[in-house]
Image: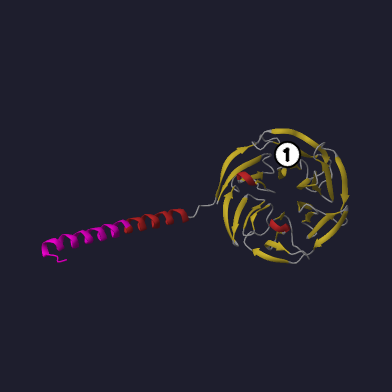
Amino acid sequence: MKFSAKSYTPLVFSIGAVVGLAMACGTATTNQESEGTVAAEEPVEPGLELLWETPAELTTNESVHFEESGDILYVANIEGGPDEKDGVGSISKVSTSGEILERDWVTGLHAPKGMTVMNDHLYVTDIDHLVEIDLATGEITETYEVEGAVFLNDATSDGKKVFFSDMRTNTIHYLEDGGIHTFATEQKSINGLRIGNGGILYGLDAEGLKQYNSDGSFELINTEVTGGDGLIVLDEQTFIASRWAGEIYLVQEGKATKILDTTEEESNTADIGFIPDENIVLVPTFFKNKVVAYQLTY
């Protein structure tokens, strides 16, 4: 078949128009996808937003523990001196919305600090003893004397053992099958402890944030947050750490970012707790006598 110039020219023009339109559409789509990708990858500024606070009735509250099985918060109140055996310390029960349910759920303690739950019992450090409390009744079922202990502080559990720190003897102990054992020594001013994924123990001391091996040896993850108090493990690369004076940090891939500073208000940030399903950080304010909840974004 023969084509005349008149019949061929419009065909060329039509093909060119189609190609041009396709290129334009492709460019627009690519630009939109590129813009969408940039928007999706834009980093979120880490921070804490105030949600609620309890009435100021939790005297010298040092730690908060969220117990998922009962959807309840346990708060340890020193009330007297942090190393005085005065029998005035207590544990309170608080709702996850900040209502004080039982101010004096457990009484007669001395200076209760770190808490953890294992086998339906709450374990609380109390100067030189580890106290075991039945969650169902609030009764003290056992008190373990820790030989040589001076200032027991934080506690955590992997479901088989209860690990707890002594800040003044620089030691991590653990309870297993009714016996007290030593896990690690020479951990200067060791305080915050938390079990992460895979049963790995993490801790905060004067050197920084540490990841412990099963034999008590360790690797330093971060050296910025020294002298930390409370510790939360979000995953193997992400942590929240508090300093008692009023600072909270988000540690990601070894780098620390301060996300709260209440030092000017003289509001302490002691042994923090966490509600994982809602990303809520629970802050015991010590001398302010209340627990404050914050929404975490990161």
Q: Main secondary structure of the magenta part?
A: helix
As for residue 24 lying within the magenta part, the answer is yes
Q: Which residues are magenta?
A: 1-25
Q: Position of residue 273 (x, y in %)?
A: 68, 46
Name the residue: 81% across, 37% down: 136
Residue on which the image places disc 1: 70
Q: Is residue 73 left or right of residue 30?
A: right
Mark 1 is surrounded, within 10 Å at the Cα level, by few (under 14), some (14 to 19) or many (20 or more) other residues, namely few
Name the residue: 75% across, 33% down: 102
Q: Position of residue 297 (x, y in %)?
A: 55, 49
Q: Position of residue 166 (x, y in %)?
A: 79, 56
Q: Is residue 253 left or right of residue 230?
A: left
Which residue occupies the foreground of this view, 127 or 65?
65
Tally the marks: 1
Quarter placement of the N terminus = bottom left
Which residue occupies the foreground of this view, 199 or 183?
199
Name the residue: 70% across, 36% down: 94
As for residue 10 lying within the magenta part, the answer is yes
Residue 292: in sight, yes or no?
yes
Q: Position of residue 11 (x, y in %)?
A: 18, 61
Residue 266: in sight, yes or no?
no
Amino acid carrying label 1: it is Gly
Name the residue: 79% across, 60% down: 171
The way the protein has been coloured in the rendering is: secondary structure
Which residue occupies the foreground of this view, 11 or 113?
11
Which element is circle 1 on? loop
